[in-house]
Image: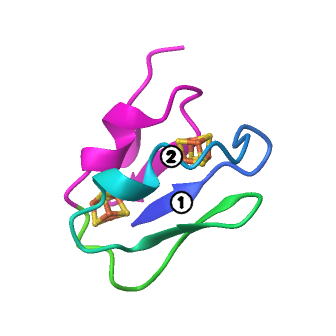
Amino acid sequence: MITIIKERCVGCSLCVPFCPVEAISCYGRAEVSEACTECLFCLEYCPVGALQEVGFGGKHNGKTS
Ligand code: SF4
Ligand code: SF4
């Protein structure tokens, strides 16, 4: 599943239009709904690496730092 690292999210909304199923909403801070298909597109677009996949294989973040 995709989670938002709340401490990192700056509420820029950049990730919102990239979600193909409109699962991300952002009102001050991003949130991911159950509509998320875990396509992982959004991980590439968050400038601060606030979107993170937490799944069976551990953690994966779109940013390396
Ligand atoms: S992983 Fe895909 S479906 Fe889920 S919130 Fe990100 S862009 Fe949307
Ligand atoms: S792109 Fe990243 S920092 Fe911007 S609203 Fe989305 S999760 Fe938050």
The residue that appears at 30% across and 51% down in the rendered structure is: 18
Quadrant location, the C terminus: top right
Left or right placement of residue 9 versus residue 64 in this view: right
Residue wearing tag 1: 3
The residue that appears at 72% across and 58% down in the rendered structure is: 29
| Ligand 1: quadrant of the figure | bottom left
Is 24 or 57 nearer to us in this picture? 24
Please provide percent x and percent y for residue 6.
74, 51
Please provide percent x and percent y for residue 36.
32, 74
Residues tagged 2 and 1 counted as in contact (Cβ below 8 A): yes
Element type at mark 2: strand
Q: Is the residue at mark 2 in contact range of ligand 2, meaning its CB lies under 8 Å from it?
A: yes
Q: Is the residue at mark 1 in contact range of ligand 1, meaning its CB lies under 8 Å from it?
A: no
In the rendered image of this protein, does residue 34 appear above or below residue 10? below
Which amino acid lies under the numbered mark 2 shown in the image of this protein?
Leu
In the rendered image of this protein, does residue 39 appear above or below residue 45? below
Residue wearing tag 2: 51
Q: Is residue 62 magenta?
A: yes
Q: Is residue 21 magenta?
A: no
Left or right placement of residue 18 versus residue 3 in this view: left
Left or right placement of residue 25 versus residue 20 in this view: right
Q: Which residues fall within the magenta stretch?
A: 39-65
